[in-house]
Image: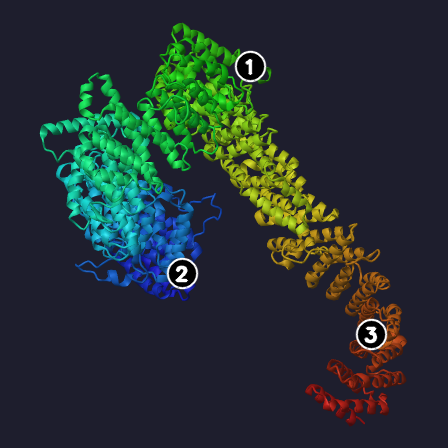
Amino acid sequence: MAAQDELNQLERVFLRLGHAETDEQLQDIISKFLPPVLLKLSSVQEGVRKKVMELLVHLNKRIKSRPKIQLPVETLLVQYQDPAAASFVTNFTIIYIKMGYPRLEVGKQCELAPTLLTAMEGKPQPQQDSLMHLLIPTLYHMKYPADTSKIVFPFNLTERPKTVQLLLEFMLDVLLMPYGSAEGTVAAGGQGLPQPPPGMSVYAAKRVIGETQWSAEQLEQCKLGIVKFMEAKQVPEVETVVHLVVASSDTRHSVATAADLELKSKQSIIDWNNPLIINKMYKVYLGDVPLKTKGGNVKQELKHEPVSTRVKLKILPHLLRSRLAAECFPANIQVVYDGLFGANTNNKLLSLTLQFVHHICMVCPDTNKPLGLMLLNGLTKLINEYKEDPKLLSVAYSAVGKLSSRMPQLFTKDIALVQQFFESMCKEEADVRLAIQEALSMMVGAYANLQGALLNLMEALVAAYIGKPEVQVRQVAMKFASTVFGPDHVPSRYLLLLAAGDPREEVSGEAKKVLRAFPTKSLEKEGPKPMPSFPDMVAYVQEKAAQRIKTPAKYIVGTSTIPFNPSAFGEIVLYLRMCLAHSAGVTPMSTRLADMQDDAPAIGRYVHTLLSSESQSKGSEANPVHIYMDLLQQLLSAVGGITVMYCLLEMVSVCPDKLAPRFIDKIDWIKSLMNTNKEDMRELAAQLYAVVVSTMTGNELQTAVYNLLKITKDNHSPESQHGAILALGYMVGRYMIKKKAVTSEESSHDMEQQMSIPSQGDDELVAMATKTIGSFLDSSIALLAVAACTALGEIGRNGTLLIPADGVGFTKLSVVENLLARIPSGKESTKMKERSIQTLGYLPVGDGDFPHQKKLLQGLMDSVEAKQVELQFAVGEAITNVKNNDVVPWVLNSILARYIPSQNPHVRQASCIWLLSLVRKLSQHKEIMSHLKEIQVAFISVLSDPDELSQDVASKGLGLVYEMGGEDDQQELVSTLVETLMTGKRVKHTVSEDTEVFQGEGLGKTPDGHGLTTYKELCSLASDLNQPDLVYKFMNLANHHAMWNSRKGAAFGFHMIAAKAGEQLAPFLPQLVPRLYRYQFDPNLSIRQAMTSIWDALVTDKTLVDKYLKEILQDVLSNLTSNTWRVRESSCLALNDLIRGRQADDLIDHLAEMWETLFRVLDDIKESVRKAADLTLKTLSKRTVAVLLPTLLEKGIVSNVSEVRSLSIQTLVKVSKTAGARLKPHAPRLIPALLEALSTLEPQVLNYLSLRATEQEKSAMDSARLSAAKSSPIMETVNMCLQHLDVSVLGELVPRLCELLKSGVGLGTKGGCASVIVSLTVQCPQDLTPYSGKLMSALLNGIHDRSTVVQKAFAFALGHLVRTAKDGSVEKLLLKLNSWYLEKEEPVYKSSCVLTMHAISHYSPDVLKAHAGVALPLAFLGMHQAPGPDEEKGESHDATLWAEVWQENVPGSFGGIRLYMTELIAITQKALLSQSWKMKAQGAAAMATVAKEQTGSLVAPHLGMVLTALMQGLSGRTWAGKEELLKAIGSVISKCSTELKKPCAGQPTISEVLEVVLKECRKESLVYKMAALRCAGDVLHSSQEDRFSNMAEILFPLMKKNCPESGGASLRSREDDDDDRDVKEKELQTEALLCAFETLGKSWPRNPQTQTRFQVEVCSLMCEKLKLSTWRVQLGVLQSMKAYFKGLLLLEKGSEDFNALSHILTETCAALTYPLENKNYSSVRTEALSVVDLIVKRTGESKQWDCVSVKSREQLQRSLSTLQSDSRPDLRDKAQELRRHIQSQP
């Protein structure tokens, strides 16, 4: 039965469908019945289901043909979601949803969009796809709120993660879908799957195309919609990054730009290391790559393709940002290979891929071997195959370099790669060459530990490339040679030596650096570097030399051929000498000859061993020593060179008996070297000659001496003489030594054998040689004098001079006197002086009983000159050569008694140096030992010398004296020293009164203020450790004078003593470190240097500072407030150094103390201390966080020391950037403080300029200042703080803000406050409500600022603030503005009102609408404000702003006035009653607008209100702008006269109005009178009242008075301004006349009595004016005439007064001839014609044509005939017509 019912129901539906005739009916039926019908599908009855299907088929046909018909989508969606519904029902339901949804209008679609998503839950995949297909196009039209802070989730996706994923996948597919390609790709079904678009799978493409495919435009909209959806943050950012990246590569500009912008805005928020994002990117980039490992492969049709190159180019830059991307193996390698070798790659992608490779090399862990290997293979493949863009190649090469430094293990075995790179380097162009050079330089490290065959391979490789023509190749080869091989690897050293001779500096310089790596201080700990052994190196060089001399590599100089180029050869020889020294057990220190001489003894021993070992092995030629000497000779003969010469001399001298004989046959060659033009060369050659000759037998010696003596006589060549003199000296010296040796052996027998000449003859020979040498002492050639001096020294050093002691001629005495005289002489060179002192010192060495010792010493000591420190050291050396027991006490005594106390500082310095020499060299001498105390006293007295060197020498001396004493002595010495230093007691010296050395406490206050400070400090340091004797150790360590590094200074060996002292001080480090640390920053230079020296010597381990950090901090902090400024300053600087680079945790306990103390020091009395404190605070501020906010706020910002303030603020700015939410509790104090700072930190000059600028400049300047303040770091900080605010803080912050607004002075502060308030309204509007009122009143108080910029800022703030305020507060505010505007005269009040109102309307329109009744009438009134005298009517003019407020908030001006009529009238009335004329005028203008706009529709009661208001306004005297009221009255009455005729309470009658207006017509002012007349005219005209008699009284005099005849002015005096005034006056008169006639016309009544009374007079007045007037007046009169004749009752039918009419017409016709014949103005003619026409017509109608006299007719005809020739055809025709008409009349 039920089934039957169902079928009947269905039948009825069917019937209804059939009956539906219109679309509307059909739609009604469908919306009612479709859902229930579909539900019937779940019926168990087959028949029912069949019937339903039938019905649906019918329905489909009808729906499909009518696209407008809407389906009940909403109901269907509900039905679709019903979980109980059968699948059959849902399947059909979705068909109709799909059909109906796109038909809905857009708004409805948007509304249902979320339901579509909800409907997807748990439905089969195809249906989900269909629903998404419906949803996506809607997204484009969805509206999201513009204010991002209020994110709305219309889709509410957070609870449906599955749906979100589906949706995102679908969206990604839509974004990847290319435009217009879809048809072809998927259509081909069947087995062979078609090729889907890039980035998509077949299935994806199918579902995006769906059943109805989108056109390209629709697709673009869909994509834009998706981007908008992402922008609105509907899903978390993490999920959408990939979508945006894909969209940004879209081919349509609109999509790409939108996505790009969105990406840029999120750039900082996105975490590019999020695995979610990166994995998704890789998946999109690579598609579904079939991996062998993952068993189950993806179904073929679900397999995603890789994306197109366009998209890849967008994805890669983002991968470059991410560390994680570089670590994702194997995806990263797949991306690399795809970019380098993929089918679709291009140069852009290649370049990005290479950047990615670099990124991987930097980031990836160096343990991932397969990754490295694949990268390397990829890069080498690219390098081998790619030949297009050299830039890309360069990047590839440098990537290999980077890879090698990350994973050296990949490269170590692969030497072929190095060779390939070297090879490419020779071939590639310059840019690429540089890249390869860089890569190879980075690769060097990978080969540092090669062994065996690989090392040999590398050696061959380097050797092959070190000689290539390209400089970069040589450079890299050199680098390999120096890095890959050990420092004792012979072949590589040889290659480096070749490189060191390279002509290009960049190669040779580097090579020399490697070869001459002399040990520096820092390396001493590591021990000497190994070097090749001398024999090996020599043999290798010899072998190579022998090879090269046979090849083109040889080098030809003049006549000789050498195997290497000279610079390389020089390097080789030097290096061999270094190897020699190294093998001999010495560490070679430098290549200076003086340093090389120090190694000679050790080298001598080593050479002896080498030679003796040779004598056993008998292999005569191959001895390394001989080879070395051959090489030296070879180079010397060809090129020369002092160092080479020295090396040769050194070899021969250390082993003369074995080596000298080799040179006997080369004697002439040596002699030739003695004649060269280099002085040093000749000296060395002379020595070599002497050594060689002295090993020869007697006769030859004699011959040689005679030869030399002969050469000395040859005056032509000073060079030869020089060589000969020196050779003589050296030979005689060597002879003396031999003689002494022989004598001491007592075996004269041997000697006889050796020297076959009897010694008598020899002595004569020697004496002769000595005399000859002596004769040159006074030579005029300085060169020879120095040589003679040197030669005499040589002889004197080795034996007694064989010349008389004194007497005449050349004697010992004369030599002494001669030489002494040279020392102080100004003519002599320093060299000569040094040699003289040296020779004088040598004389007592060879002859212990030298006769003139005291004279000699006295002379030396008296020869002190000004600063010649080197010479004083030489004198010291000379003095210590005296070993004679009688002389030493005498010398000591004279130094102590005579020289040390001298007043000449140079003498004191010199004597101190001598004393030091004596103590050092004769330390065991009993005289010295017994005078230790005196010597110490002497040294102490010099300590206070102003000269640093003197002090240093004295301090060293004190140390030596102390070391020499026994224990008792030491005790006594220490106590004396400490007492003197600390108390400053003067050491007893018998000195004359005026040279007191120390005056009481004046110790150390020497002229330049240095003096003893350093030593006092050292002493106090020692005393603090309770170890006063340590002061000596400190003195030893404090050697910072450069002198000790010089040749003579170093001889004292203080380095050793210092090292020892350092060891002894080690136990005291804990106490010393803090003090020394601080002393390193002492402002006194000498103390600083001394202490730094001690520090460097003691603190070798840099971790000591960390170890003693606590102690150092304590010391520094306690001394920050010391009494002496030096200590304060050094503490500041030390603290600065200490906290730099430290973690805050180390310092956390002391932070507050540091800040507080430093703030105090910032106000120090001494400037340098203040600067130091400032510097420290800046450093400190970087290290500290919210810990110190209280200090900064309480002590810093409010300080009255400007430096403290500015520093605190800088710190606050930095702190707040990092402190984040920790700022919250401090915000109420921090924000106002910073806001105040905005002004205090602004340069004062700006205020000054601002005061003196013009208005315009001022506002421009102020706005610049304000924007500078807003973008300043301070404001940034304020904004940072604002982000963390909430209710808890506002209560404290707001009162302070109000305070600031009231009391704030500077522009910046005020502007800043305003912008803070704006930020608050945006961030926490609800929380702000309780405080808004306070803030509003504070802002209102300050809004009348002189600066317009501040006004605007405050108004802006108010505009935002009203949103959060209570209604009452807003109401009050608006009323306040109202009263200001109406009552205050000053423009500043007006502008504040308009700015505030405008801001409210702009930023809080809803608030304004809520209070429209108060606000808008004011705006309406404001619109009518006239611009001030200096304002233009521009954009920013007040009236314009008011108008904007009005227009934005009313529904069109007409409607607005209608809405607010009562309020408008109230406010305009107030304005009219105002005391100010301007305001009255403004009110009048506003009133007029109301009247004009509303005229047609004004009815009671408004009409009465308006009129009453207007009439009230009229009473009283006239004022500018009052005319507006008259105009208004005129327009109101003319439009509403019918309404006014109905009587109504409170509504004035027309006659009342007329009374008032007529009263105004009688006012004096012409302009005003005219306005009143016009008004009266309008009123009379529209109301047809008769007040002509009143009007005549006013008008007639006007007409009669104003007769502007031409020529009237010519009689006036022609002064310019009079002229001007006349012209103006005349114009005004004319205007008045015109106005009078116009009014006359309008007020001409249709009243017979009045007409009878005035008609003739009026007519004659008009006619008179027609005759003598300007064209404008004529025109006016004619118009008036027209009105007159239209209203003339005489022309009506049945009028009897024939005479009167005939009189009027006669007069008129006569007058009309004038305008008719007016040739110039066609308008006048036209008007005249129309008057004639009117007269003709009306006389015709009333049958009174007879009244026109014959004469008048003729006049008219005549005038009309002149118009026959008129230029205007219409006038011609009209005139002709009238003429005919007149003619035709009887």
Q: Which is nearer the N-term, disc 2 or disc 1? A: 2
- Left or right for 225, reference 1206: left
Picture layout, residue 1252 above or below residue 1237: below
| In-front residue for pair 813/452 | 813
Specify the amino acid type for callout 3: Arg
Residue 1147 percent location from the top left of the image? 44, 24
Q: Image point 49% across, 34% down: which residue?
A: 1214
Q: Which quadrant of the structure image shows residue 657?
A: top left
Q: Amino acid at mark 2?
A: Gln
User: Where's residue 1451, x and y in %?
Assistant: 60, 56
Q: CA distance from mark 2 to mark 3?
A: 68 Å
Say few, some or many: other residues with alpha carbon within 10 Å of mark 3 (under 14 / 14 to 19 / 20 or more): some
**Mark number, residue 27:** 2
Name the residue beneath numbered marker 3: 1646
Quick check: 1594 above or below 579?
below
Q: What numbered label is drawn on residue 334?
A: none
Q: In this orientation, which residue lies closer to the viewer: 253 or 889?
A: 889
Question: Could you tell which of marks 2 and 3 lies nearer the N-terminus?
Answer: 2
Question: Which image quadrant: the C terminus?
Answer: bottom right
Q: Position of residue 1648 (x, y in %)?
A: 86, 75
- Which disc, if any, is residue 991? 1
